[in-house]
Amino acid sequence: MLEREFRAPRDLVFEVWSEPKHLANWWGPNGFSMPSCEVDFRVGGKYRICMRSPEGEDHWVRGEYKVIDEPQRLVFTWLRENADGSIWCDTLVEINFEANGDSTHFRLHQSGFGSATHRDEHRGGWSECLNRLAAYVAVPQ
């Protein structure tokens, strides 16, 4: 589980998970860009995102929204694709957003990994991604 405290209101932190115009500004590990992002943000809706590494390698992820309880909870599947479209990682991501005054306490739990190596790789990627998210939503003090 990853936990963070974001210096931003809960409504804003939740919102930036819902729209490609926001996702493109913070999604992915450090140095990654997002050349493609399709989001149908509703329960049963699907998403598909391409994260491009600084070396130009594309990493595709897709899934389906299972729970959208705005602005407090978000649950979606997380499927990583190989270049041929086959899935090599099939997990579930659960996120909780808790209002804490003018800040948001955030918890992310991803489950269903096939190996500890995959779990640890995702933990590192999410950590960098959440650092980028914190900078994107931060309200100046």
Image (cartoon, rainbow, N blue to C red):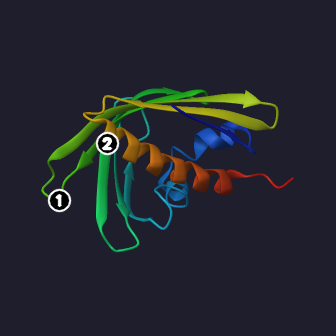
Q: How many marks?
A: 2
- Above or below residue 115? Residue 130 is below
Which of the 4 image quadrants contains residue 103? Answer: top right
Please give the label number shown on residue 21.
none
Q: Nearer the viewer, residue 120 or 131?
A: 120
What percent of the width, then of the height, locates residue 5? Answer: 70, 39
- Above or below residue 32? Residue 43 is above
Residue at horizontal 52%, vertical 52%?
129
What percent of the width, then of the height, locates residue 30? Answer: 51, 62
Viewer can see residue 63: no
Q: Nearer the viewer, residue 99 or 134?
A: 134
Q: Secondary structure at mark 2?
A: helix
Instruction: Name the mark nearer the viewer: 2 or 1.
Output: 2
Q: Is residue 48 left or right of residue 33?
A: left
Q: Determine the residue located farthest toward the front in the rendered image.
A: 116
Q: Secondary structure at mark 1?
A: loop
For the residues labelled 2 and 1, the Cα–Cα distance comes to 18 Å
Residue at horizontal 20%, vertical 44%?
88
Q: Is residue 25 left or right of residue 47?
A: right
What amino acid type is highlighted by mark number 1?
Ala
Viewer can see residue 81: yes
User: Which of pointers 2 and 1 lies earlier in the amino acid sequence?
Assistant: 1
Residue at horizontal 48%, vertical 68%?
31
Please give the label number shown on residue 118.
2
Which of the 4 image quadrants contains residue 119? Answer: top left
Please give the residue where the numbered disc 1 appears in the rendered image.
Answer: 83
Q: Is residue 50 left or right of residue 27?
A: left
Which of the 4 image quadrants contains residue 73? Answer: top right
